[in-house]
Amino acid sequence: MKLFSLAGDVAFVTGAGSGIGQAIAIGLAEAGADVALFDLSAKGLGETLDAVKAHGRKGFVFEGSVSDETHLAAAVEGAEKELGALTVAVNSAGIANAMPAEEMPRERWQQMMDVNLTGVFLSCQAQARVMLPRGKGSIVNIASMSGSIVNRGLSQAHYNTSKAGVIHLSKSLAMEWVEKGLRVNAISPGYTLSPMNKRPEVADQLKIFANETPMARIATVDEMVGPAVFLSSAAASFITGHDLLVDGGFSAW
Protein backbone atom coordinates (compact mmCIF):
# COMPACT_ATOMS: atom_id res chain seq x y z
CA MET A 1 0.00 0.00 0.00
CA LYS A 2 1.26 3.45 -0.92
CA LEU A 3 0.22 4.82 2.47
CA PHE A 4 2.91 2.72 4.15
CA SER A 5 5.58 3.20 1.49
CA LEU A 6 8.75 5.12 2.32
CA ALA A 7 9.90 5.26 -1.30
CA GLY A 8 11.81 8.49 -1.84
CA ASP A 9 12.47 9.00 1.87
CA VAL A 10 15.87 9.34 3.51
CA ALA A 11 16.03 7.97 7.05
CA PHE A 12 18.52 8.38 9.89
CA VAL A 13 18.61 5.67 12.56
CA THR A 14 20.60 5.79 15.79
CA GLY A 15 21.50 2.53 17.48
CA ALA A 16 21.45 0.89 14.06
CA GLY A 17 24.19 -1.62 14.85
CA SER A 18 22.12 -4.05 16.88
CA GLY A 19 18.76 -4.95 18.39
CA ILE A 20 15.67 -2.86 17.76
CA GLY A 21 17.58 -0.11 15.94
CA GLN A 22 19.10 -2.58 13.52
CA ALA A 23 15.77 -4.26 12.80
CA ILE A 24 14.04 -0.93 12.22
CA ALA A 25 16.82 0.37 9.93
CA ILE A 26 16.46 -2.73 7.77
CA GLY A 27 12.67 -2.44 7.87
CA LEU A 28 12.77 1.18 6.69
CA ALA A 29 14.90 0.08 3.74
CA GLU A 30 12.44 -2.70 2.94
CA ALA A 31 9.70 -0.04 2.94
CA GLY A 32 11.69 1.93 0.35
CA ALA A 33 13.88 4.40 2.26
CA ASP A 34 17.59 5.01 1.92
CA VAL A 35 19.07 4.81 5.42
CA ALA A 36 21.91 6.50 7.30
CA LEU A 37 23.15 4.17 10.02
CA PHE A 38 24.54 5.68 13.24
CA ASP A 39 26.02 3.88 16.24
CA LEU A 40 28.83 4.11 18.76
CA SER A 41 31.08 1.67 16.89
CA ALA A 42 31.22 0.00 13.51
CA LYS A 43 30.47 -3.37 15.10
CA GLY A 44 27.16 -4.51 13.66
CA LEU A 45 26.76 -1.57 11.30
CA GLY A 46 28.33 -3.49 8.41
CA GLU A 47 25.73 -6.22 8.81
CA THR A 48 22.95 -3.63 8.84
CA LEU A 49 24.38 -1.93 5.77
CA ASP A 50 24.51 -5.22 3.88
CA ALA A 51 20.85 -5.87 4.68
CA VAL A 52 19.84 -2.36 3.59
CA LYS A 53 21.62 -2.86 0.28
CA ALA A 54 20.02 -6.30 -0.12
CA HIS A 55 16.69 -4.51 -0.27
CA GLY A 56 17.98 -2.40 -3.14
CA ARG A 57 18.41 0.76 -1.08
CA LYS A 58 21.37 3.02 -0.36
CA GLY A 59 22.94 3.12 3.06
CA PHE A 60 25.79 4.90 4.75
CA VAL A 61 27.54 4.22 8.07
CA PHE A 62 28.42 6.85 10.67
CA GLU A 63 30.19 6.20 13.98
CA GLY A 64 29.64 8.46 16.96
CA SER A 65 28.00 9.02 20.32
CA VAL A 66 24.46 10.31 20.71
CA SER A 67 25.65 12.22 23.78
CA ASP A 68 27.97 14.31 21.60
CA GLU A 69 26.18 16.92 19.51
CA THR A 70 29.19 17.40 17.23
CA HIS A 71 29.09 13.72 16.23
CA LEU A 72 25.38 13.97 15.46
CA ALA A 73 25.67 17.20 13.50
CA ALA A 74 28.47 15.77 11.37
CA ALA A 75 26.53 12.56 10.74
CA VAL A 76 23.34 14.39 9.73
CA GLU A 77 25.36 16.61 7.41
CA GLY A 78 27.09 13.57 5.96
CA ALA A 79 23.80 11.71 5.53
CA GLU A 80 22.33 14.57 3.53
CA LYS A 81 25.45 14.80 1.41
CA GLU A 82 25.49 11.06 0.65
CA LEU A 83 21.78 10.23 0.52
CA GLY A 84 19.78 13.43 0.16
CA ALA A 85 17.41 15.50 2.29
CA LEU A 86 16.50 13.82 5.57
CA THR A 87 12.77 13.11 5.98
CA VAL A 88 12.59 10.31 8.57
CA ALA A 89 14.49 9.64 11.80
CA VAL A 90 14.28 6.86 14.36
CA ASN A 91 16.26 7.28 17.58
CA SER A 92 16.90 3.87 19.13
CA ALA A 93 20.34 4.20 20.74
CA GLY A 94 20.25 3.44 24.43
CA ILE A 95 21.72 1.51 27.34
CA ALA A 96 20.27 -0.51 30.21
CA ASN A 97 21.48 -1.90 33.51
CA ALA A 98 20.15 -2.48 36.99
CA MET A 99 21.25 -1.50 40.49
CA PRO A 100 19.39 -0.78 43.74
CA ALA A 101 18.69 2.94 43.99
CA GLU A 102 20.26 3.28 47.43
CA GLU A 103 23.54 1.85 46.13
CA MET A 104 23.69 3.66 42.81
CA PRO A 105 26.65 6.01 42.26
CA ARG A 106 25.76 9.33 40.75
CA GLU A 107 27.99 8.48 37.78
CA ARG A 108 25.82 5.52 36.80
CA TRP A 109 22.65 7.60 37.07
CA GLN A 110 24.22 10.35 34.99
CA GLN A 111 25.46 7.99 32.28
CA MET A 112 21.94 6.62 31.84
CA MET A 113 20.51 10.12 31.48
CA ASP A 114 23.30 11.22 29.15
CA VAL A 115 22.68 8.38 26.69
CA ASN A 116 18.99 7.54 27.00
CA LEU A 117 17.50 11.00 27.47
CA THR A 118 20.00 13.68 26.54
CA GLY A 119 21.11 11.51 23.62
CA VAL A 120 17.56 11.40 22.29
CA PHE A 121 17.18 15.15 22.73
CA LEU A 122 20.43 15.88 20.90
CA SER A 123 19.48 13.45 18.13
CA CYS A 124 16.08 15.12 17.67
CA GLN A 125 17.71 18.53 17.72
CA ALA A 126 20.23 17.66 15.01
CA GLN A 127 17.56 16.04 12.84
CA ALA A 128 15.03 18.84 13.32
CA ARG A 129 17.53 21.51 12.36
CA VAL A 130 17.54 20.21 8.80
CA MET A 131 13.89 19.09 8.67
CA LEU A 132 12.19 22.20 10.07
CA PRO A 133 13.29 24.65 7.35
CA ARG A 134 11.68 22.30 4.79
CA GLY A 135 8.45 22.01 6.76
CA LYS A 136 8.34 18.21 6.58
CA GLY A 137 9.56 15.22 8.51
CA SER A 138 8.91 12.45 11.02
CA ILE A 139 10.89 11.56 14.14
CA VAL A 140 10.22 8.39 16.13
CA ASN A 141 11.92 7.89 19.49
CA ILE A 142 12.25 4.46 21.06
CA ALA A 143 11.16 4.68 24.69
CA SER A 144 9.94 1.72 26.77
CA MET A 145 6.87 0.57 28.64
CA SER A 146 9.19 1.09 31.64
CA GLY A 147 8.58 4.79 31.11
CA SER A 148 4.93 4.24 32.02
CA ILE A 149 5.07 1.31 34.47
CA VAL A 150 7.60 -0.02 36.99
CA ASN A 151 8.96 -3.47 36.19
CA ARG A 152 8.37 -5.90 39.01
CA GLY A 153 11.61 -7.38 40.30
CA LEU A 154 13.99 -5.00 38.51
CA SER A 155 15.91 -2.28 40.34
CA GLN A 156 16.30 0.22 37.53
CA ALA A 157 14.98 3.58 38.69
CA HIS A 158 17.51 5.36 36.46
CA TYR A 159 16.44 3.45 33.33
CA ASN A 160 12.72 3.87 34.01
CA THR A 161 13.16 7.58 34.63
CA SER A 162 15.15 8.06 31.43
CA LYS A 163 12.46 6.35 29.36
CA ALA A 164 9.67 8.34 31.01
CA GLY A 165 11.65 11.39 29.96
CA VAL A 166 11.83 10.17 26.36
CA ILE A 167 8.04 9.84 26.24
CA HIS A 168 7.40 13.33 27.56
CA LEU A 169 10.23 14.81 25.50
CA SER A 170 8.62 13.35 22.37
CA LYS A 171 5.26 14.89 23.26
CA SER A 172 6.86 18.23 24.08
CA LEU A 173 8.82 18.40 20.83
CA ALA A 174 5.73 17.32 18.89
CA MET A 175 3.84 20.33 20.22
CA GLU A 176 6.73 22.72 19.63
CA TRP A 177 7.05 21.63 16.03
CA VAL A 178 3.45 20.76 15.12
CA GLU A 179 2.89 23.98 13.17
CA LYS A 180 6.20 23.54 11.34
CA GLY A 181 5.31 20.28 9.60
CA LEU A 182 7.37 17.96 11.79
CA ARG A 183 5.73 14.99 13.54
CA VAL A 184 7.32 13.45 16.65
CA ASN A 185 6.14 10.21 18.22
CA ALA A 186 7.45 7.51 20.55
CA ILE A 187 7.31 3.72 20.55
CA SER A 188 7.34 1.98 23.93
CA PRO A 189 8.32 -1.67 23.53
CA GLY A 190 7.46 -4.23 26.14
CA TYR A 191 9.82 -7.07 26.97
CA THR A 192 11.76 -7.67 23.77
CA LEU A 193 14.55 -10.12 23.03
CA SER A 194 17.12 -7.44 22.27
CA PRO A 195 20.71 -7.29 23.53
CA MET A 196 19.46 -5.29 26.53
CA ASN A 197 17.23 -8.17 27.61
CA LYS A 198 20.05 -10.65 27.20
CA ARG A 199 21.79 -8.98 30.14
CA PRO A 200 22.90 -11.36 32.91
CA GLU A 201 20.72 -9.63 35.50
CA VAL A 202 17.51 -10.36 33.58
CA ALA A 203 18.38 -13.76 32.09
CA ASP A 204 16.67 -15.73 34.87
CA GLN A 205 13.58 -13.57 34.61
CA LEU A 206 12.78 -13.93 30.90
CA LYS A 207 10.31 -16.74 31.59
CA ILE A 208 8.68 -14.65 34.29
CA PHE A 209 8.46 -11.70 31.90
CA ALA A 210 6.74 -13.92 29.34
CA ASN A 211 4.29 -15.28 31.90
CA GLU A 212 3.44 -11.76 33.10
CA THR A 213 2.71 -10.58 29.56
CA PRO A 214 -0.90 -11.21 28.46
CA MET A 215 0.30 -12.58 25.10
CA ALA A 216 2.49 -14.97 27.12
CA ARG A 217 5.74 -14.39 25.27
CA ILE A 218 8.63 -12.00 24.69
CA ALA A 219 8.57 -9.82 21.57
CA THR A 220 11.13 -10.15 18.81
CA VAL A 221 12.98 -7.06 17.59
CA ASP A 222 11.26 -7.47 14.22
CA GLU A 223 7.91 -6.78 15.87
CA MET A 224 8.99 -3.16 16.39
CA VAL A 225 9.50 -2.65 12.65
CA GLY A 226 5.84 -2.35 11.65
CA PRO A 227 5.06 0.31 14.27
CA ALA A 228 8.14 2.31 13.23
CA VAL A 229 7.30 2.13 9.52
CA PHE A 230 3.69 3.08 10.28
CA LEU A 231 4.58 6.14 12.36
CA SER A 232 7.17 7.22 9.77
CA SER A 233 4.80 6.89 6.82
CA ALA A 234 1.89 8.81 5.32
CA ALA A 235 -0.40 6.31 7.04
CA ALA A 236 0.29 8.22 10.28
CA SER A 237 0.02 11.71 8.78
CA PHE A 238 -2.44 12.87 11.50
CA ILE A 239 -0.52 11.32 14.41
CA THR A 240 1.92 13.33 16.49
CA GLY A 241 2.76 13.47 20.18
CA HIS A 242 1.72 9.82 20.60
CA ASP A 243 3.38 7.08 22.64
CA LEU A 244 2.62 3.76 20.94
CA LEU A 245 2.82 0.90 23.44
CA VAL A 246 3.96 -2.33 21.77
CA ASP A 247 3.92 -4.50 24.87
CA GLY A 248 1.77 -7.57 24.22
CA GLY A 249 -0.90 -6.10 26.49
CA PHE A 250 1.40 -5.86 29.53
CA SER A 251 0.32 -2.39 30.62
CA ALA A 252 -3.38 -3.30 30.38
CA TRP A 253 -3.11 -5.52 33.47
Image (cartoon, grey):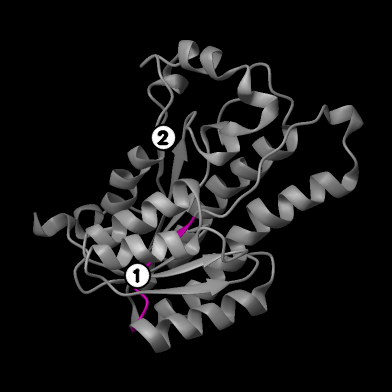
Q: Is residue 88 magenta?
A: yes
- For residue 200, what is the image quadrant? top right
> CA gap, disc 2 to disc 1?
22 Å
Q: Which residue is denoted by mark 2 in the rendering?
A: 245
- Left or right: residue 181 compared with residue 114: left
* Image quarter hosting the N terminus: bottom left
**Residue positioned most to the bottom:** 81
| x and y percentages locating residue 219 in the rendered image | 40, 29
Under circle 1, the secondary element is strand
- Left or right: residue 19 compared with residue 7: right
Q: Which residue is denoted by mark 1 in the rendering?
A: 137
- Tell me which amino acid carries mark 1: Gly
- Tell me which amino acid carries mark 2: Leu
* Residue nearer the viewer, 57 or 243: 57
Q: Is residue 36 above or below residue 247?
A: below
Label 2, residues with CA under 10 Å away: few <14, some 14-19, many ≥20: some
Label 1, residues with CA under 10 Å away: few <14, some 14-19, many ≥20: many
Q: Is residue 162 magenta?
A: no
| x and y percentages locating residue 235 in the rendered image | 19, 53
- For residue 85, what is the image quadrant? bottom left
Q: Is residue 109 above or below residue 157?
A: below
Q: Look at the image and give the residue range highlighted in magenta.
A: 84-91
Under circle 2, the secondary element is strand
Q: Is residue 240 above or below residue 33?
A: above
Which residue corresponds to the image point at 70% horizontal and 26% vertical from the top-left? 201
Q: Earlier in the sequence, mark 2 or mark 1?
A: 1
* Residue nearer the viewer, 76 or 17: 17
Is residue 21 at least partly visible in the picture? yes
